[in-house]
Image (cartoon, rainbow, N blue to C red):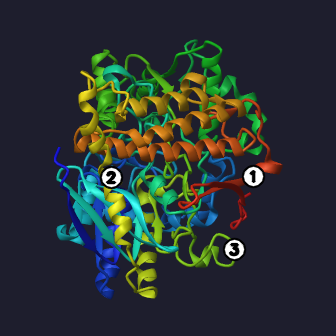
Amino acid sequence: MPMNFETVEVTTDFLIVGGGMAACGAAVEAAYWGKQHGVKVTLVDKASMVRSGAVGMGLSAINQYIGVTKGTNTVEDYIKYVKYDLMGIARDDLVANIARHVDSSVHLFDKWGLPFWKDDEGGYVNEGRWQLMINGESYKVVVAEAAKNALGMDNIYERVFVIEPLLDGDRIAGCVGFSVRENKFYVFKAKAVLAAMGGAVGVFKPKSTGEGMGRSWYPPFSTGSSAYFTIKAGAEMTCQEVRFVPVRFKDAYGPVGAWFLLFKSRATNAMDEEYMATRRSELANWGKYGAVKPIPANLRNYLGMLDQFEGKGPLFMRTDEAIANLAKKYEGDEKAFKKKMKELEAEAWEDFLDMTIAQALLWAATNVEPEKGSSEIAATEPYFIGSHSGASGAWVSGPEDLAGGTDYFWGYANMTTIKGLFAAGDASGASSHKFSSGSHAEGRIAAKAAIKFILDNNTQPNVDAAVVEALKAETYKPLEIFEANKGYTTTPEVNPNYILPKMFMFRLQKLMDEYVGGFSSNFSTNTKSLNRAMELLTFLQEDSDKLAARDLHELMRVWENKHRIMQAESHVRTVLFREETRWPGYYFRADYPKIDEENWLCFVNTKYDPQTKEWSVFKKPVLNLFNVD
């Protein structure tokens, strides 16, 4: 690998970092306002936008649609749903701001050609109260094309991995990154930056190993870059202790939402006991959250886990029963019955083919016929995701009309505590259940606010050339380490002078799994385990200086791991700080096994000082802005 890397400088006004749903929403909105005010907008993505982000493989449903025009749902209804599902920990202002704008994003998807399921009157088909069914294999392709058309390809840089922020005092000044295909080092200079680089997978040990390694529910190329970028910039973070553990079809992580909401299927243990019924009394131990409908996702998880801990597993989705029940009304008319059964069977398979093709392949490989037999479901390993049922991300300002005059507002919607640095999608915290459509809407919200910030602060921040050169040297150091030491051993994978990224990742995943409540420890941890995790993370951080790479692809893996370990450390510190169990089913503090509303109905926030490398962890109040308690 030659060590001569060209430096490419790109100067713009507004820089969007990421290519997922939030970034695509931001691109469309920023292009609209930018053209009106002469603001240059640029987007940089680690991947190719058409298949980038959590929706890259496709999606079988849009999970946030308020439908306020029907008069059945309100923004307040959605805030209540989100707040209860997160056991009381959510930002009313952020959730409301997304909820009141999300329908317009969904209508744009329809306009752009995304195939929606439609009823006989031409209306959307709901999967549940907030969910719409789509034929979504090309969901991301449709949304990305709109973003590309809005910005123009001259303003888009693909396959460039942004790794570090650039600062000018207390203001963001841009970022640096490298091409994963060419020998080019990029320096992006901007007046405002939007972080929208996704959540994190691979921090905990995955259940899929061997030939299945890399198979996960959340996309494996989301490696904590949003958290790393905002933390390293010095931004205040929130909900870093909240991880998400979805229950999915076992091994291939196929979606269960359609089966629960559309097919009305039951989930049972191996004895055909419906744990949501037999374990119902357990819900009383979790205060008012155990009495709400729908039951919070983590509590639903927990009831199934209790059965498995008692040896009543595996758990099953009763797909055959659900399909039979839906076809029952056609009994007596053999032709109509067969037609309906065939239709339901096709819908069952399509649910996977739209978004999790691996599950369809696994069903086929293991002779599963959903209309004839049940299929296993199981809890996955933990993920960090601010857009689904998790909440981790940056602490961002709310909009003035909802949050003005409170501690939730400091100038521009979705701006972090660093001037000019905005966050959306998985990068912004405390605003769960925005999913794909809400992330797109939040990207639009953040982009419009960023354009306003630029017009109010229309000077180009300074970028220190010496800092850039130091970051360039640090970026490519893993290549130099490998070149200098590769001859020391006959097998390059084993060398006392460096560590390769795969081995580094295994170490991180092992310690997080065993000490911080991964699946092998039944999602349980305690103070002693967490302190041991911090000790091992310190050793691993030291060893990160010896990460080595043999080529550009492996260099990308090096930096993905550097990003993951920052997400891991922030998680351990905040789980240690919150002395209660608020989210059983996501993690369980064995030494503090109960929920503590008096002391811990609050946000746990963190701040990292890039200069001293010291962390602070502290509480922030949950404000009840919409009388949703």
User: Which residue position is annotated with label 1?
Assistant: 601
**Can you give x and y, in whole percent of width and height, for residue 515 in the image?**
60, 29
Image spot of residue 253 (x, y percent)? 41, 31
Left or right of residue 602: residue 139: left
Residue in the picture at 62% in, 54% down: 615
Which mark lies nearer to you, 2 or 1? Answer: 2
Quadrant assignment for the N terminus: top left
Which residue does the image show at 41% across and 82% down from the upper left? Answer: 454
Considering the numbered disc 2 on the image, is that residue within a helix, a strand or a loop? helix
Mark 2 and mark 3: Cα distance apart in space: 41 Å
- First in sequence, mark 2 or 1: give its number: 2
> What residue lies at 76% left-to-right and 33% top-to-bottom?
593
Q: Which mark is residue 475?
A: 2
- Identify residue type, mark 1: Leu
The span from disc 2 to disc 1 (Cα, nearest Å) is 41 Å
Query: x, y (%) of residue 629?
Result: 74, 57
- The reply to whether callout 2 and callout 3 are in contact (CB within 8 Å) is no
Disc 2 or 3, which lies upstream in sequence? 3
